[in-house]
Image (cartoon, grey):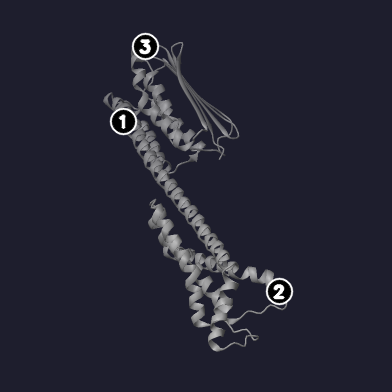
Amino acid sequence: MIKNISDKNRTIQLVAHAAAWLCFFFLPYLVFFPRLRDFSMSNHMLTVIVLNNIMLMVFYYLNTMVLIPKLLIKEKWVLYILSLVACLLFFLYVPRTLAMWIYPPEIPLNVTENTKGINLRSNRIGRIRRRPYADFFNTVLFLLVITFGACIEVVRRWLQTEQNRKETEHERINTELSFLKSQVNPHFFFNTLNNIYSLAIVKSDKTAPAVLKLSAIMRYILTETERDLVPLENEVAFIHNYIELQQVRLTDKVQVNFTIEGNTSPLLVAPLIFIPFVENAFKYGVSTKEQSSIDIQLKVTQQEIHFYSKNYIVQSENNMMENTGIGINNVKRRLELLYPEKFELSHQIENGYYIVKLLINTAS
């Protein structure tokens, strides 16, 4: 299939080049010649025009395919200019000489001199008629074709370089996102398995339901996180499962509130974008000895998602809050890659509470 696309593009390019050359060569004659009713063209003039057009095509492709890549792009300015000068001299004199050999100029009817005189006068008339304007016209035409070809080639190379840069950047972003996801998943599973292990140690009846919840969470990660964006309602269900799994090990001293405002079904969001904040809230905001609370809010508007997390900082864990940066830094980096200049993230400590605010603009 790729080969077919390449062949199709090549055919389109050939047709475009052929159409451009036909327009370039025949448009002036179609515009001006119908006005000249008494105009007639000799075989010699026709031969010169055909040879000039062929030479222009040759020099166009010589310039774009050889001189520009080998000299201009490599900044060999002197060689490039000398090559163009040589091509110009070739264009000015070689087609004319070849035309003299193929179809010599016709002898004027009013000339009565001898053969030698006719040849001399014919050559003199040819020089007088061509040199005052023909060389200037051909030089301008040559420079026009060369300049146009150089501009087209430079623009084409710039576009190709820009496309390669974008493809490279896209691959880099995909690679980095995959790496960040691979950091999120083990970090999350490590904490969850520790919780289930604690239940198993005490032979709690909550162990089996916890395993089922973990199975649902693993299924979500394996099936959904391969995509860049997932339905927001799926992400909300994932957070619900996570909170319920965490509540298995909590006591009555911990109060967890998870509220949702707005319609989550129309929006898409990056998978696992909120869970590091939720995870840190349970990791550093839960105490078995004193009252603690966790408030998580998700407010959805037409194009925006407002996430809010607030947890009481357990005193014994207060000094460890500075070590929670791995997950949050990963989320921030993913936000920078997926939502450039479309998010606002802040996290701070106020009155013994750790507060996270995240705004994501999902407008494309």
Residue nearest the viewer, comparing 69 with 319: 69
Residue 110 seen in render: yes
Label drawn at residue 161: none
Quadrant assignment for the C terminus: top right
For the point 59% across and 84% down, the residue is 107
In terms of secondary structure, where does tag 2 sit? helix
Few, some or many C-alpha atoms within 10 Å of disc 3 (few <14, some 14-19, many ≥20)?
A: few
Residue labelled with disc 1:
190
Few, some or many C-alpha atoms within 10 Å of disc 2 (few <14, some 14-19, many ≥20)?
A: few
Quadrant assignment for the N terminus: bottom left
* Residue 114 in the image, given as x and y percentages of width and height: 56, 89
Q: Earlier in the sequence, mark 2 or mark 1?
A: 2
Three-letter amino acid code of the residue under disc 3: Gln
Label drawn at residue 315: 3
Q: CA distance from mark 1 to mark 3?
A: 24 Å
Residue 109 vertical placement versus 176 (above, below): below
Q: CA distance from mark 2 to mark 1?
A: 85 Å
For the point 32% across and 34% down, the residue is 186
Residue labelled with disc 2:
34
Residue nearest the viewer, comparing 227 with 16: 16
Q: CA distance from mark 2 to mark 3?
A: 96 Å
